[in-house]
Image: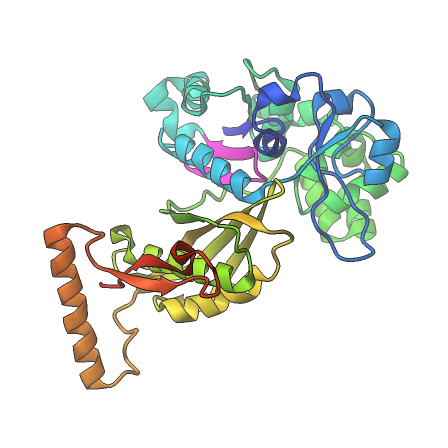
């Protein structure tokens, strides 16, 4: 049995600062920064905005025309990612193997948890307690069935669609559900123009006709409408390390580059790294004017050398849309141990570095993790001495 846990308006709640802010107000997540000439489209909207005809993905001009009192909230991708990771970790904490969808929607297979929690309803109760927030939960034979059930139920209740009823249940659901799947999202608009309103009408068109008109996406849509889908692909358990540093008044590229180097040094010095290299990191910033920015950086090869990692991060710092209030660096994926990182260095230099690393570890063992530090220049042109340099960990082992 596939269980879908849906947190309504997740991105808007994080950006606005809580559910109390949404009460009675027409709010929407402001359009993200896009290329010149592209249509600005809003993000998630509140219930008051939906009541006036505003929908997610609508052009900004049309949304304001329908709701002149619409308030835009700056999006914060970094905060959304952090809150979403906490929610996923809470679900994994009860033993669930989760397959994350878009932020706010996650799928899991409850069969392995039935004996532990007493059936699917017991599993749903445990999931609700683990999140400790209003959620919509539905269960069905496939992802789409479970998602449709979650969207149709109330936050404090759950809907369970048995396997034999899945096909009949989906037949009456709107075809706009296909927007939730990236494989079939592009079909919703042409299907609506053709007069197809429900998944039952889509199923009756036939697999051959959909394949002829829409190709592989049409085949996938017909399979989903027939309550058939691929097995879940749960994510592998992972450990996230994160470091954050506040940005002072100096927000130049040089200052941010120095802060990024500081964050890299701190991550490399964390004992939880256990000598592993970094393969993928996420660079996020809280903007001074409100909202946030986030960018995922995939390193070309696993690295544990701070200078090379900083070289990979520097081009992304130039993409910041506004001055930053704080900078956060998170390790999303580790690589193999860095035992061969010094292979190109000379033998004498390698021996010297090994002795230095051993000395640093001895000092840290005797006096604590912050006993061995080095001076890192951040903003050499600042008039305030405390902003010119900052103490960073010495990369030991």
Instruction: Pinpoint residue 155: horizontal percent, then vertical percent.
Output: 57, 17
Residues rendered magenta in the picture: 97-109
Tell which of 286 and 186 is nearer to you: 286
Instruction: Pinpoint residue 238: horizontal percent, then vertical percent.
Output: 37, 47
The colour scheme used here is rainbow
Could you say which quadrant of the image residue 14 lies in? Answer: top right
Looking at the image, residue 264 sits to the left or right of residue 49; the answer is: left
Is the residue 302 above or below the residue 181 in the image?
below
Looking at the image, residue 309 sits to the left or right of residue 250; the answer is: left
Instruction: Pinpoint residue 181: horizontal percent, then vertical percent.
Output: 66, 41
Quarter in which the C terminus is drawn = bottom left
| Residue at 56% in and 50% down | 324
Tell which of 140 and 193 is nearer to you: 193
Magenta: main secondary structure: strand
Is the residue 121 above or below the residue 84 in the image?
above
On whether residue 100 falls in the magenta region, the answer is yes
Is the residue 207 above or below the residue 365 in the image?
above
Tell which of 160 and 164 is nearer to you: 160
Looking at the image, residue 245 sits to the left or right of residue 25; the answer is: left
Could you say which quadrant of the image residue 176 lies in? Answer: top right
| Residue at 25% in and 56% down | 274
Could you say which quadrant of the image residue 76 lies in? Answer: top right
Instruction: Pinpoint residue 259: horizontal percent, then vertical percent.
Output: 44, 58
| Residue at 79% in and 35% down | 202
| Residue at 89% in and 34% down | 195
């Amino acid at each position: 049995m596939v269980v879908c846990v849906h947190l309504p308006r997740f991105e808007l709640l994080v950006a606005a600062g809580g559910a109390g802010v949404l009460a009675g107000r027409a709010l929407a997540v402001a359009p993200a920064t896009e290329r010149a000439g592209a249509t600005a489209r809003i993000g998630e909207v509140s219930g008051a905005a939906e009541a006036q005809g505003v929908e997610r993905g609508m052009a900004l001009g049309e949304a304001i025309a329908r709701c002149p009192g619409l308030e835009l909230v700056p999006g914060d991708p970094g905060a959304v990612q952090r809150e979403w990771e906490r929610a996923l970790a809470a679900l994994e904490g009860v033993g669930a193997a989760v397959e994350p969808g878009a932020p706010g929607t996650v799928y899991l297979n409850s069969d392995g948890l039935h004996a532990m929690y007493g059936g699917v309803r017991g599993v749903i109760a445990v999931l609700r307690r683990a999140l400790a927030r209003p959620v919509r939960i539905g269960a069905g034979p496939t992802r789409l069935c479970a998602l449709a059930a979650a969207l149709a139920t109330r936050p404090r209740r759950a809907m369970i669609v048995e396997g034999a009823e899945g096909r009949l249940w989906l037949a009456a659901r709107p075809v706009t559900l296909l927007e939730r799947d990236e494989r079939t999202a592009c079909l919703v608009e042409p299907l609506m123009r053709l007069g197809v309103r429900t998944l039952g009408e889509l199923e009756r068109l036939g697999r051959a006709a959909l394949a002829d008109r829409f190709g592989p996406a049409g085949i996938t849509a017909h399979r989903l409408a027939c309550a058939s889908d691929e097995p879940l692909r749960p994510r592998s358990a992972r450990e996230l390390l994160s470091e954050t540093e506040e940005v002072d008044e100096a927000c130049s590229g040089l200052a941010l580059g120095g802060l990024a180097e500081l964050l890299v040094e701190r991550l490399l010095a964390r004992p939880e790294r256990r000598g592993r290299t970094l393969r993928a990191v996420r660079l996020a910033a809280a903007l001074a004017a409100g909202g946030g920015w986030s960018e995922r950086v995939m390193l070309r090869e696993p690295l544990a050398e701070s200078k090379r990692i900083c070289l990979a991060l520097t081009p992304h710092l130039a993409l910041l849309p506004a001055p930053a209030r704080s900078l956060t660096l998170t390790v999303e994926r580790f690589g193999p141990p860095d035992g061969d990182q010094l292979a190109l260095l000379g033998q004498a230099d390698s021996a010297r570095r090994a002795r230095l690393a051993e000395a640093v570890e001895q000092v840290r063992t005797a006096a604590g993790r912050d006993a061995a530090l080095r001076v890192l220049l951040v903003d050499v042109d600042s008039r305030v001495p405390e902003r010119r340099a900052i103490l960073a960990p010495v990369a030991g082992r």
